[in-house]
Amino acid sequence: MQPTMEEFDSEDSGVQDVGPQINGLLVQILETMSVPLVRIRQKLLEMAILICVILLVFWVALFLYGSFYYSFIPTANFITPVYFFYRTDCPSPHHSVCSFPVANVSLLKNGKHQVMTYGQPYRITLELEMPESPANRELGMFLVKMTPYSKAGQIVDISARSAMLHYRSSLLQALGTVVFSPMLLTGASEQKQSVIVELYSEFKDDSYNPTVGAIIEIHSQHIQIYRAHLYVFAHFTGIRYLLYRFPLISALIGVMSNFTFLSLIIVLSFLQFNLGGRRTRGKAVMQQEENNEPDDLNDQSEPQDEGNAPENFDAIGCNSVEVEESIPDVGVEESEDDSRELAEDEPTCEAGDGEMILRNRNLSQSMLQSSQALTDTTDKTYYRVGVCSSC
């Protein structure tokens, strides 16, 4: 059987009835889901801001520790090569060397920056690589002299130390030559000794005459040297010793201390800002309420004054006794004109009508003529209440 038109209409009406319900359900679901979504978004935003603040505080703490370490820890060591020179213009042809070997060493890093810090003790040593030649073995002891000087050329100090090669017998030298002959033949090893001369054990630079260089002189004309190096080591004590010997632990403690201190400052500032804002808002609200209280009292008193007379007059019936009300006597005699005006204001009643008519007139005190004048001007209202005799 084919469906009739009534069935189609019923199906359409059913679909139309379901559509609004589905729309309402979707709107309700969206409304219920909007609040949690807003809260989640707010929490994510707060977490992102918190992470950014933590990273910023961490980098600031790291920068502060790095700046402190760079400014507090001086140059730990300084190594520079030493090149000796001597004179050869001897008057006697029997001597090829006319002077002691001398070297001029700069104690500036990159030729600009000061190597030694004022007040910091330094250990200065000279390393000499000398061959085990017969000339050096016969040389015996020799003197090494160091003379630091300032930028103006003034001599800061003078130090002299003696040194010599370590003694080795001819048998020991022969055995060493046999054993190390392969390396000696290939050039991997050499027959030489390193002589270390300690020129200063604790050298402190003068702040008034900072050292910029030194003259090193070896008092021997027959000495033979492969190469030489000057070493400047800082002798740390106390906190500098801990920072230099334990850099990782010191960095961890320093960065965490700075991070904790900065975090504490930020938290206290945040709490102070919130408390101060709440106090300011509370004071503003209290002041506004105090300003609004007199206005509210005035607004409440005016309707009461205006509403008293009609309520009292409504309570009085047409058959009541004649009542007259007037303002109290203020001790001033009224003039004849004023009494005439008051007589005209007496209550009247129209025929066939039982309603009372209240007439009032505002009289200013300036109209009253008397010997004693009042300082303030007041308004006085006269009320006349009456009934009709015909009622």
Image (spheres, rainbow, N blue to C red):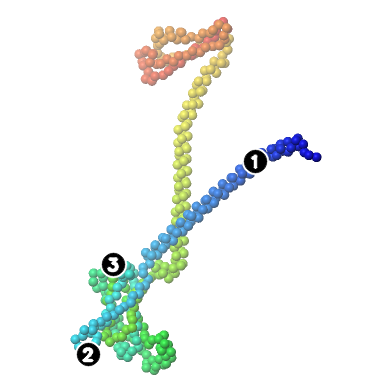
Q: Residue furthest left?
A: 91
Q: Quick one: 206 or 110, which is closer to the camera?
A: 110
Residue at left 32%, top 84%?
Answer: 225
Q: Which residue is mark 2?
A: 94
Task: Name the amino acid type tagged 3.
Answer: Ser
Q: Secondary structure at mark 3?
A: loop
Q: Could you tell me how far apart the alpha carbons at marks 2 and 1 are, in whole angstroms?
A: 120 Å
Quadrant housing residue 340: top left
Q: Is residue 223 visible?
A: yes
Q: Residue furthest front?
A: 2
Q: Which residue is mark 1?
A: 23
Residue at left 51%, top 23%?
Answer: 303
Closer to the eye: label 1 or 3 = 1
Using the image, tell me which numbered label, if any, was put on residue 207: 3
Work out whether 127 lies above or below 2.
Answer: below
Task: Name the amino acid type tagged 1.
Answer: Asn
Q: Quick one: 87 or 18, which is closer to the camera?
A: 18
| Horizontal side, residue 105 vs residue 284: left or right | left
Work out whether 147 lies above or below 341.
Answer: below
Residue at left 55%, top 50%?
Answer: 43
Quadrant of the drawing holding the N terminus: top right
Residue at left 30%, top 88%?
Answer: 139
Task: Name the amino acid type tagged 2.
Answer: His
